[in-house]
Structure formats: structure tokens, C-alpha cells
Amino acid sequence: MNPTPWDEERINRAALAAVHDPGSLDLDRPPEPGAAARRWEEVRSADTALGRRARALDPERLVEGWVRLGVRFIMPGDVEWPSSLSELTRCDRLDHQGLGGVPLGLWARGPLDLAESCDTAVAVVGARAATAYGQDVAVELAHDLARPGGRRGSQQTWTILSGGAYGIDIAAHRGALTAGGRTICVQAGGLDELYPRGNGAVLERIVDEGLVISEAAPGSHPTRPGFLARNRIIAALAGGTVIVEAAARSGALSTANWASDMYRQVLAVPGPVTSSRSVGPHSLIRDHRADLVRDADDVREALGPMQPELPREPVPEHRTDALNPEVLRVHEALPSRGAMGVEELSRAALVSLTDCLLALQELEDRGMARYGADGRWSVRLHG
């Protein structure tokens, strides 16, 4: 992808983003389009900690480093800027530890177009210390969502969003990559050093095939507030958020809270009641804050109407399903062993003698009853 040229507006806005912490209250009013240069000068001239940080930064030199790294800066007004991020303005920062707001911009590495990829995006997040069950679910879920033609033949493909962390996050990314689908990783730190290092091979593959983005400037290290601020980006970019596993105080529940505040769909995968990793999803489902989903088809159905209504899973038919109530009663009255006469059967089934004879004839035609040489009737087990 060809990055947008670094004009004065982009340089100044990127400089502002580099000195502000992600989701910080220091940025109470983002600059209007075309006003980044004036705001940058206001910040640089202020006798504050933020002003001192700004005066220590050389934007032109930093841009050279960002270009060498292959990082582009996406900002409001760009074709690649997702309009869904504007919905962050409706979230109350007091409910999210003072973090929030629309980001000044996002740094990005990778060939995918951010806005286009987020048109049909779903977040799959969960516990870092995930169980084998949770990781298997995340891989299969992401794989099936990222490829066309799920078990019920849907041609809708979804971009898988997650945070690249150990456990559920990286399992979801792996599932999407294995399917040859789209995946986006939202980092809490700078894109010059992808985090965590233990997931480096998968993260580098996302850089090559998908997209890695961050609100934090290159050179920034992940912080606890940074992770919480990152969660709002994941929730805002996705049409829905799936929680696979999460302990009672898991950061994944923060993503669910952000999604709820933006009136986005929250979905949760149930797990073993004996597992502490099931506490989060089960609490969301119990409190009616999330819908229960089992697989990718459930997610597709919940996140419609981006795809046509999916056909229902075929339910196995039983041979007795086609019988009307009177015929079914006669069939149920037939002994599992031995045989019975018509009069005895009519009494046992509580139907008239005539109705009993008609029912037995239908059962015989269906291969479900046998008339014996002794004039009595028995169950026929095989048609």
C-alpha cells in the first residue's frame, strides 16, 4: 500500500499523537482538520510536562525513522480512516478509568487498508492464560469466520481483530492466517518493537499479510493504561466482540465494556463451569450483557444483516416424527417384545377399534408394524 505523503498537517498531527499518551485526558479537544500546526505550537509553548516533552521532540527527524520502518500515519479525513472510531465520543471516560476519546491518529504497518478491512470486522479476544479448550475454540472460530463458505455455506468473510497477546488473542490471529483471511492486530506499544516478543513470528506474518496498528507512537513501550486504551480501539473497529475465555478481572472484559458503550454486539463462548477462565463469559451471558455463541455460524447470524439469513442446521429426523397423534399412540402401544391383538391394542392406545385398524395399516405401509399369521401385531424394527 502506498502511504499518504507526509505533509505539514500530517507531521504536526503525528507529533501531537507522539507526545500524548493513548486515551489521555490531556487531549480534551482534538484539533479540527487543518489546525494541527496551531495546536502543536500551543503544546510546545506551554510550561507543562507535556510542553517539555513536545520541545524535546524533533518531528522531521522522527518522520525519517517512521518512513524507514515502513510505518504510515492514518488520521481523520484519510480514506483509510474508519468512521466507526468517531463513536468513541459517546463513551463516558469516567466509566473507563479516565481513558477514551477518538485517537489523534493510528500508526500502521502492513498491506491491508484499515477502513476497508473494518467494514466487516469482528474482535475475538480473551484470556492470556488460556486453556487448551479456549485456544482451540479461538483458532477454529477465527478460521471459519475468515474464510468463505462456513459449515452452512456463507460467503461472508470477516476480518479478525485482536490484540496479539498470548492465549486467545494470538490463537485468533493464527486461525485467520491459516485460513488465508484478513487479520488486524492492535498493539498497545510502538510498532518498532512488536509485543509480546514470544509471539514475534506470528506478529511479523501479520505485518507481511495483514495489518498491525497502534495509537502509541513508535518507540513507546506498552503500559497498563496503554492496554486499557488499546481495548477501546479494538471495540470501536469491530462490528462485534467475541469473548472466548476471561477470568473475573480479565482485560478482555474491558473490551466488552467498550463495545457495550458503543451499542456494539457482545458475544461470549461458554466454557466448563469448573474453569476460572469461564467466569467472564458466563457472567456476561448471565447478566444479559452478551449473547451465547458456539461457533462461527452463530457469530455470523448474530452480527447480521451483513449476510443473507443462514439456513438452519438440519435436524435429524426420527421415523415417528411423521406420524399423527393417533397413529403414534398405536405405535407406542405396540410391545417391544411379542405381539398384541387389535382389541387389546385399541384399549392400550385409547383409540377406537376402527382407528386402531387404520393406524396399524399405515404403520404396516411404513414398515413400522408387522401383521402375524396368528392375527396379532408386533413392532417392525427395520423398514
Image: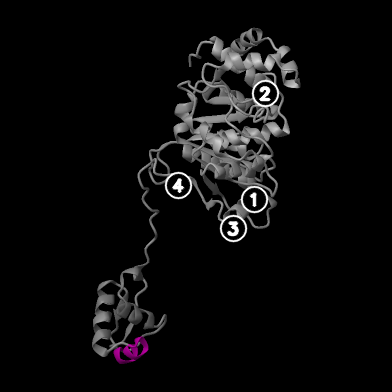
- Span highlighted in magenta in the image: 342-350
The CA distance from mark 2 to mark 1 is 32 Å
Q: Is residue 62 above or below residue 337?
A: above
Which of pointers 2 and 4 lies earlier in the amino acid sequence? 2
Q: Nearer the viewer, residue 186 or 258?
A: 258
Q: Residue at x 56, y 40 (%)?
A: 124
Q: In the structure shown, which secondary structural element does the residue marked by tag 1 occupy? A: helix
Q: Which residue is mark 1?
A: 280
Type of amino acid under label 2: His
Circles 2 and 4, Cβ within 8 Å, touching? The answer is: no
For disc 4, the marked residue is: 297
Asked if residue 347 lies in the magenta stretch, the reply is yes
Dividing the picture into quadrants, the one containing residue 20 is: top right
**Mark 1 or mark 3, which has the lower sequence index?**
1
* Three-letter residue code for mark 1: Gly
Q: Residue at x 64, y 42 (%)?
A: 254
Sooner in the amino-acid sequence: mark 2 or mark 1: 2
- Residue 20: assigned label: 2
Q: Does residue 272 appear left or right of residue 304 in this picture?
A: right
The residue depicted at 59 percent of the width and 58 percent of the height is 286
Q: Kindly report which numbered mark, 3 or 4, lies closer to the viewer in this rendering.
A: 3
The earlier-in-sequence mark between 2 and 3 is: 2
Distance from the alpha carbon under mark 2 to that under mark 3? 39 Å
